[in-house]
Amino acid sequence: MRIKGDQLEQHLRKELHPVYVIGGEDPLLVGEAADAVRAKARALGYSSHEVLEGGKGFDWSSLQQAADSLSLFAEQRILELRLPEPKPGTTGAKVLEAYAQQPAPDTLLILITGRLDKSALNSKWLKALDRTGVVVTLWPISPQQLPGWIARRMRSRRLDVEQEAINQLADRVEGNLLAASQEIERLRLLHGTGRIDTQTVIDSVADSARFDVFKLADAALAGDAVRCSRVLGGLRSEGVEPVLVLWSLAREVRALASMAYDVDQGRSPDSVMSAHRVWESRKRLVGRALQRAATNHWRTLLKQCAHTDRVIKGMAAGAAWEELLTLVLAMAGARSAATPGLVSRAL
């Protein structure tokens, strides 16, 4: 059985299966889903809990041994396996398939892993566990979905807030769900339940947004010029060195120039991205960038990267942060937006 994260609570009210696979990128969503399954199990009498860390070099026989070992007191138990990525390898896949065919008695297996991409969802081992238990897929909360997520979470904590307060909080946490959750709990502890206005949120909530060079590159690939300006301004205010920002952007531009050339030669974008080892989670972003501009555009941006590098090193006239803004906006497809007015407003 496959369900989405928002269906898990309703599912657990009805039943508990012998196997749960919980996959997702966000640690808060994954952690809370696992907590919900554990809480249901404990309510049904599962009293012991064993955790196996299935990282690199994991001995898969230890899972089989744990499954085969019976408690002296015949108690129900939770067996938790944590895999950083849904890639158990050949040996691990065989062990999981075998377990799915014959689950250990009085045992709840919870497999916690990363994002379940198409390859993982189509694998034999996952399909086997799917037939025996439940696969819970947890997709990231997009910036557009974040205000709604915050509103639902606040209602669950009996907080009545204005929409503008929700928007303020969403803007401050910059997609960090853990930070959003912590700030909501902090508001509840400081001000109690009930009505909370926008000014209270502004006064009480710390700015939990954390900007990094990888977020900047992703915003550029997504074509989000406004977010590019915001993240770049955040990097500057946090004291990040311009050379580090340029390194991140130039790396993306070089890769896109090479991939765009391959696409121009008649190869499909999917095959090109696979050949360049683009992560599955970033293929949509890279694909959008390849659709937005051709080879000549990315080659021009390579020259712009070189010029920006000279400005940063003091070998050419100009302001480093203004050059970086011009570059990142061009990457996002907003060439005409890189005006002095926008530079001064953003930075």
Image (cartoon, helix red, strand yellow):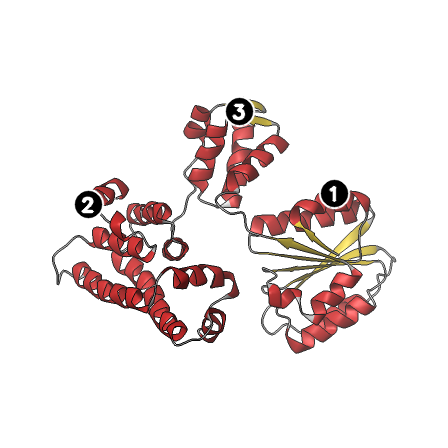
Q: What residue is shown with label 3?
A: 191
Can residue 308 be seen here? The reply is: yes
- The answer to whether 336 is drawn above or below residue 53 in the figure is above
Does the residue at mark 1 contact the one at mark 2 (Cβ under 8 Å)? no
Callout 1, which amino acid? Gln
Mark 2, secondary structure of its residue:
helix
Q: CA distance from mark 1 to mark 3?
A: 30 Å
Q: Position of residue 331 (x, y in %)?
A: 32, 58
Can residue 86 be seen here? The reply is: no
Q: Which mark is residue 340?
A: 2
Q: Is residue 151 left or right of residue 337?
A: right
Q: What residue is shown with label 1?
A: 10
Between 8 and 92, the one lying in front of the other is 8
Q: Residue at x 41, y 28 (%)?
A: 203
Between discs 1 and 3, the one toward the N terminus: 1
- The answer to whether 282 is drawn above or below residue 230 in the figure is below
Callout 3, which amino acid? His
Q: Position of residue 268 (x, y in %)?
A: 47, 72
Mark 1, secondary structure of its residue:
helix
**Number of the front mark, 3 or 2:** 2
